[in-house]
Image (tube, rainbow, N blue to C red):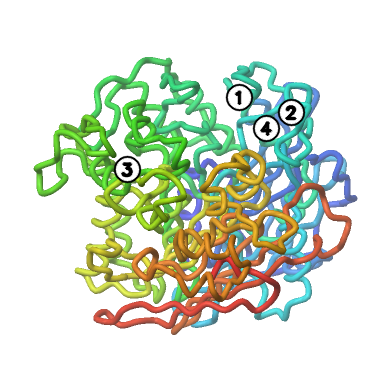
Amino acid sequence: MAPISRKVFIQTAIALGATAAWGHSLTLPSAFSWRERRDLYPEGVASGDPDSNSVLLWTRYPSNGHAAKKLNVEVAEDESFHQVVASAKAVISEASDWTCRVLVGGLKPARVYWYRFTDAKGNGSRLSRTITAPTDNDERPIRFVFVSCQNVNQGAQNAYRRMIFEDEGAAELDRLGFILHLGDFIYEIVWYPEDRPQGMYDRRIRDIVRYQHGEKIEDFHIPTVVDDYRAIYRAYLHDPDLQDARARWPFVCMWDNHEFSWLGWQSLQKFQGTTRPAQTRKVAANQAFFEYQPARIFKPSGPSLDQFHPPRVVDQPVTHFDDHGLGQETNNMTAIRSLRGYRALRWGRNTELIITDQRSYRSEDPTDRAEANAFSSKDFPEFFPEEALEIFDAGRVYDQGHPPVSVHYGDNNVPNFRKDQPPQTILGAEQKAWFLEKLLRSKATWKIWGNTIATLDMRADPQNLPPDLTRPWPGSGFAGFVGGDFGTAYVERGEIYDFVRDNGITGFATVAGDRHSFWAGLAAKFLPPKSFEPVGIAFVTASISAPGMVEAFEHVFPKDHPLRPLFVGQGPSDARPQPTVNMLLRHGVKSCLEYAKSGDISKARALSNPDLSPHVSFADMGGHGYSVVRVTSDSFEAEFVCIPRPLERSNRADGGPLLYRSKHRAKLWGSRETPRLESQIVEGDARFSV
């Protein structure tokens, strides 16, 4: 990013709702007395969204009174604050839940800075560090981590402790530049211990928050007003490992579903099969995100430097949707536009991070409709016929505008409830146009799509099950898995990939979260039997701590079900279930059944179905941890760091043992070349994932 004037910088701070602090060329000793009082800053400090000359800083300083207060914020080139380069007074008030956002400019590129907050009595926050981005023409290699899905209610954040330990021991050039958090920073769904005394699987329920105005649904609780959303952010930020990570690196955060509502889309919530308007809650969720995340997100509610100023909305039914699935009800439009999160950040010559919002503008997931339940079967749990997924996704444009009236499934013909409706969208028309333009205009070597949800197809081949195992698969071919991500948004994903291909865009890489699993693969519009033509590379990171599919199946998949070996099978000598679902997704049903019979991985892989998943190099539906990206002018590497199931906080400095470490590397390809991905297990055991 080119240097900007002080005037433009102040205008930027106003647009972001942040106090402005402009750096000066001379370094000076701190003018304030300071003594550390972390107890007065109970949620810690944070920095976010750095560019080459500025960064956002954040803290919370709660007060017992109602009057606004001011904090001194200082930024220095040294940890002792003898070389202070910027300072300002930040306003905190009850209206912003005593949080503040400070945009510090006039900084040097690719530089580590130290910052702290101090009150009028000299009581200070912890000392913390942040890092500015390199300039747009800087060729240096870039390293960052992408993470998602941390659940403080049900697990420990040991991954952050491991991350910090490894970074502290790394050479300066090998240290991380920032943390990309791809959503589910909080889980708004909270269980109270007394409501679920048996815990969640093998997990202990932590008593982290009590919603003052919340709503109870079944055995869990959800927030209803901004104070509830604020309360869950505060509860999460009391976690010591998360707090330490936010104090060490700048975070780049994007919301996913749980920052608003589990099955939410636009400003709608869905519980117990009923979709209901929740415009007031969407605005409340956006306000809390704005107040607690130092991010360069745009609020249209006014130029206030210290308050969100939520727009007034009411909860009204949303009944009319345009041709892109966007609900036209006025309160819905106001709610989803109360905060705009999609944005792009440049990090040197080789990296442009293009971040999109997958929840605010999306249409309803077709498979979440009641009519889709006709394809659920106890005989084939989790499987959904791929042909039905394609038909329902495309709606009226299927088969060049000739969708079928019904979909065949075994002996049934299920009405095509989507035949007169537009194709599914996840990005929405306006954001998609912005995203494609960013891809086209990017001058960076690697155009990295920061996507909160996965893009890689997730499918199985139940058509190859032996006839004596269970009844015949009622679908016509492969089976997909529902989940509401780009893995089943075939039309829109295909539009994006065609755009990449047709415009000769190289270095297209996607990093994603949400699936609670590690994935590495190739970005392709179609899989066999259609033409397989990759245009990029794609990765998914496992959850920091939220439970995953393997953990769930160990507890809930019936032990006498004939298809259990496909998901959590056991070889003859295994003492416990194995994550054979990884093998199912990578190699197919025959490999899983062979493993259950012989326990021989080599024999199992020999029966791999080559047409099932040529796009997948690695899949682990049971992993936890984080993913490290290393970008150079000619290569992209994603390293999966997998830790044991984080049931309790580790007392080790390194956050506990590793299960495995795998690396997945692609060389930069030309506009007429096919991307290729090489995978390697460099430490530990991930034999079911490759």
> Which mark is drawn over residue 474?
3
What amino acid is found at the position of numbered circle 1 in the picture?
Ile
Mark 2 and mark 1 lie on one chain; the one further toward the N terminus is 2
> Which mark is drawn over residue 209?
2
Q: Residues within 10 Å of mark 1 (few under 14, many from 20)?
A: many
Q: Nearer the viewer, residue 132 or 205?
A: 205
Q: Measured along the vertical axis of the image, is residue 456 above or below residue 267?
A: below
Point out the frontmost of discs 4 and 1: 1
Q: Which residue is mark 1?
A: 222
> Which mark is drawn over residue 527?
none
What amino acid is found at the position of numbered circle 3 in the picture?
Pro
Residue 21 image offset from top left, x and y in percent: 61, 53
Point out the frontmost of discs 2 and 3: 3
Mark 1 and mark 3 lie on one chain; the one further toward the N terminus is 1
Q: Nearer the viewer, residue 15 or 252?
A: 252
Alpha carbon distance from label 4 to label 3: 44 Å
Residue 334 image offset from top left, x and y in percent: 37, 27
